[in-house]
Image (cartoon, helix red, strand yellow):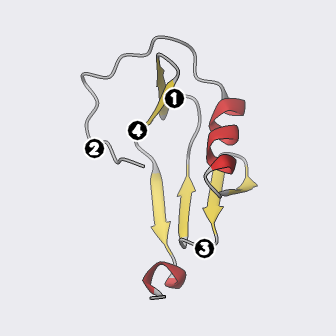
Amino acid sequence: MYVIVEQPYVNSTQITSLTEIKKFLLSKGFLHKKNNDYFHPYLGIILEDLHDENVITNEGLLFFVDTVFYITNEFYKEE
């Protein structure tokens, strides 16, 4: 996962599908909480506001822009 803080150079080549966003995040271990919000229980990361205007699709790749994210206490646990 990469964080993009500016995206003037990322162009959309197709409409972003909310289904594709969900499919991608579920495959990475995230759980769908509600609406456009996800949670990774093992990593302790919460991602919110992942609607089709905040995720750009370029040639099949998803670029997450303006994502609201939080970390929980799980994030800090050492193994």
Residue 65 is tagged as 4
- Which is more N-terminal, label 4 or label 1? 1
Q: Earlier in the sequence, mark 3 or mark 2?
A: 2
Res. 5 mark: 2
Where 52 falls versus 4 (above or below)?
above
Q: Residue 42 carries which label?
A: 3
Q: Marks 3/1: CA distance?
A: 27 Å
Residue type at mark 3: give it.
Answer: Tyr
User: Could you tell which of marks 3 and 1 lies nearer the N-terminus?
Assistant: 3
* x, y percent for residue 7: 29, 30
Give me the residue at 28% from left, 43% from top: 5
Q: Name the residue under label 1.
A: 53
The three-letter code of the residue at mark 1 reads Glu
Q: Where is residue 72 in the image (x, y as percent from the top left)?
A: 52, 78
Q: Distance between the residues labelled 1 and 2?
A: 15 Å
Label 1 or label 2, whichever comes before in sequence order: 2
Mark 1 vs mark 4, CA separation in Å: 8 Å
User: From the viewer's perspective, is the residue at label 3 or at label 2 nearer?
Assistant: 3
- Are discs 3 and 1 less than 8 Å apart at CB? no
Depth check, front residue: 58 or 35: 58
Please tell me which residue is depicted at 31% across the width and 42% down the height of the picture.
4
Q: In the image, is 76 to the left or to the right of 16?
A: left
Q: What element carries label 4?
A: loop
Front one among 33 and 26: 26
Task: In the rendered structure, find residue 69 and report the number of the disc placed on it.
Answer: none
- The residue that appears at 42% across and 49% down in the rendered structure is 1
